[in-house]
Amino acid sequence: MTKCFWPIDARLRHWHPVVLAKRVTRKPLAIQCCGVPIALFRNAGGGITAFYDRCAHRRMPLSHGVVGPEGVTCAYHGCRFSPDGTGYCPTTRSNRFRIPVFETKLLHDVVWVRSRDAANAVSHDLAADTGVHPDLAADDHVFGSVVAKDIAAPLQLVVDNMTELEHTGMVHKQLAFGIGDYDTVETRCRHDDESVTIFYRGRQRPLPGYLSLFMGLRRGDVYVQTASVSFTPPCASYRISWTVGPDGSTRPFGLRFVNYYTEVDAERTSLFSFFYWKTEGTWLHPMPRLAMPFFRRLVAAELERDKAIIEKMPRNEASLEWFQLSRFDGPLVATRKLMERHYAPACDDRVAWDPAPATVVGAVGRDARA
């Protein structure tokens, strides 16, 4: 078997959401995750296979190939690879290959990938991520839908925006605070070695009458949000509720969002927002199938506004020394420190995947032949 080294970013030791499942068909789909090229396709059994998107022979992207009963055939020289990554070239049948295969799972109609080789190869302080965020499980909130956005901006700028609420008054139109409400906002931020927790409470901006009616909210209600942000991999969980005035009872309606921020490459980020709601005791509860498409559009519109503003931010003026910060920017400083500790150090860490005989760790720029 020809010996090759395949550089796989160590950040792929974690499970990352990469694409909506409906986009994956029998035709290979080219994606990137953490800068690593991956080809996704439906295999003969209907499951999803994820290959390193390069042929071992001459590095032709396998996403240009054809899926057949035995796997993928490369468009360049006809090399054939089975779902376990082993393959051969029909022009020289003695030439046997193996390419990396990524683990896949389906959750909430999204395809997730990770590299078992990266998980096994990294050192103890970069321990493998064996699951996904616990808030993706059901509790008193019912899963509603997922909204995905491809954002033409580095991961850092996306996380900066999505973990603060100060922009809400200008950028958003519905939930949380209006620009004139910030004198009422209470904010706290605390962090430990694993996560940053952010708390906001303040007067809810006036909502359209139909939203107030169906969500069971009234003018003068207080918006309450607790967010938890972590970086193994980058994700944030938001729990949102409303109270009757500053010290009143909690309204029946509630929301929960779990946002995953998947780094496509150094200049692009995919946002996957999984949202859940609690509707019992509101007018929404008897008609979830009718209400959900509308509410999904509302969430998608708000996230589209995030996308638009993030893409306007200058890339070369994003370090902290350029900023004059306010009382709302504690989360920005805390999340940047945590990201540097848990995620950014892996940026230059490549797993040299050696199909025979073992996996080692090192910075590898080119293939090596035995």
Image: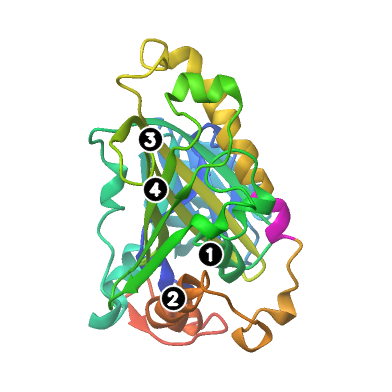
What residue is rendered at 65% in x and 40% in y?
Answer: 173
Q: In this orientation, does residue 152 appear?
A: no
Give the left or right position of residue 330, taking residue 226 as reference: right
Label 2 environment density (alpha carbons within 10 Å; few <14, some 14–19, many ≥20): many
State yes or no: discs 2 and 1 in contact (Cβ < 8 Å). Answer: yes
State yes or no: discs 3 and 2 in contact (Cβ < 8 Å). Answer: no
Tell me the residue that label 4 is attached to.
224
Residue range (magenta): 306-311
User: Amino acid type of disc 4?
Assistant: Val
Please name which of the two marks, 3 or 4, marks the residue nearer to the observer. Answer: 4
* Pick the front one: 152 or 163: 163
- Rounded to the nearest angstrom, the CA distance separating label 2 from label 4 is 25 Å
Task: Give whichever of discs 1 and 3 has the lower sequence position.
Answer: 1
Please name which of the two marks, 4 or 1, marks the residue nearer to the observer. Answer: 4
Dot 3: element: strand
User: Amino acid type of disc 3?
Assistant: Tyr
Task: Give whichever of discs 2 and 1 has the lower sequence position.
Answer: 1
What residue is rendered at 68% in x and 85% in y?
Answer: 322
Residue 351, compared with residue 91, is above or below; it is: below
The image shows residue 209 at horizontal and vertical percentages of: 58, 22
Please name which of the two marks, 3 or 2, marks the residue nearer to the observer. Answer: 3
Q: Which mark is residue 339?
A: 2
